Amino acid sequence: MKLLYVIVSMGLGGAEQHLLRVSSALHRRGFEPEIFVILPGGPLTSAFVEAGVPVHGAHLPGWLARLLRDRRLIAGFGLFFSAFALLRLYWRLRPRIVHFFLPAAYLVGGLVSLFGPRMRRIMSRRSLNLYQAKHASSRAMEHWLHSRMTFISGNSQAVVNDLLGEGVERERLRLIYNGVNVDRFNDVRSREYVRAGLGVSGDTLVFAIVANLLPYKGHADLIQAFSLVRAQMPGPWVCLCIGRDDGIGDALRAQAEAAGVASNLLFLGSRQDVPDLLCAADIGILCSHEEGFSNAILEGMAAALPMVVTRVGGNAEVVLDGETGLVVAPQAPDELGQALLAVALDPMRKEKGLLGRSRVESVFSMEACLQAYEDLYRDCDRRTV
């Protein structure tokens, strides 16, 4: 079965890495997945190609970019080139199913697909629809496109509920949780080796948050939370902040300095060794203001970390409050700080982390995720166009 995925970029975000794992595994199972990238380039491109998944895209010719000069014109013409290249690819590949990931890919790929050959269409929503409040025209276009999709999937029940509220019929909706390959967290470097490389001693309590430095990921709340409980921490502690700086890194460092916790925060940037880092930690954190369904939570649980997460999106569908970690209100530094302290002092911390890993293995495995995608594509293929 020939599949074409449309996505915005090849960055190191959760959606892109999820698609890499899914498409490469489906390729090994006999599917024929290919990718179209609206903004080509990016660090994951080679990983897709090496996995046997071709990647397509269209760059604006250099001479035209130099002629246009203005960034808005360059972006507009670049989008036109991508849309035209995608239309040509639809007609050349004639995929059995085209699958859109993320809103921008849905808008561009979905609209262009209406001028392509007959094919089945799937849209995957991976976040709550809060973003639509700022973009009324995009919201209207998405709602209009919904009726033209064969199926629509969400990666948490919270996302599925949003889609129901947007008028999508329940029979065309699918819930497909993200999956994590737990084996990635077995073959890791030793805890002592990783900590030594970070300059962290063996008796230090290590928190870890995997999230790009974006306002809605809640790092500012986390810094305030740590400042409120630092005097009560049981001995030395650090927090590994793993993720790309998308523009607020300097402000967060200044906040940490003013709060007296700058020496406790290690900003590591984007990393390829996340399993190693998580397995060297003791407690995982995700304090987002909004979320669809976080791969970072699954990865933390796969590393046997008790998790402290905010009650947004699908977070509370994964972390069992009081059993595999604690779930707190978003944008509530006081509550977040008390939860971090409670887990730090919990004598059953390791056992709760192991229970979280067991939950990932039984409910959120990559195998279960792949089977759900296979079932979706088989059901979709049986639909007439």
Image: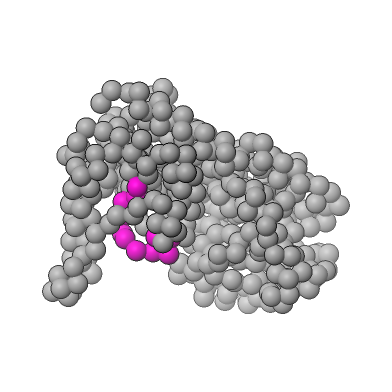
Residue 149 left/right relative to 129? left
Instruction: State the residue lying farthest toward the right.
Output: 347
Foreground of the two, 21 or 177: 21
Locate residue 366, reporting x and y percent: 57, 42
Locate residue 285, reporting x and y percent: 65, 55
Foreground of the two, 256 or 295: 295
Locate residue 378, reporting x and y percent: 41, 28
Instruction: Name which residue lies at 72% across and 61% down.
Output: 281
Residue 71, placed above or below residue 309: below
* Residue 353 in view: yes
Locate residue 100, reporting x and y percent: 35, 43
Foreground of the two, 309 or 306: 306
- The quadrant of the rendering that contains the N terminus is top left
Residue 77 left/right relative to 10? left
Q: Is residue 38 magenta?
A: yes
Q: Is residue 367 magenta?
A: no
Q: Which residues are magenta?
A: 34-45
- The quadrant of the rendering that contains the C terminus is top left
* Residue 165 in view: no
Residue 267 left/right relative to 345? left
Residue 204 left/right relative to 285? right
Instruction: Name which residue lies at 18% across and 61% down.
Output: 77
Report which quarter residue 48 is drawn in: bottom left
Residue 139, placed above or below residue 170: below
Instruction: Name which residue lies at 39% across and 64% down.
Output: 42
Instruction: Name which residue lies at 49% across and 49% down.
Output: 21
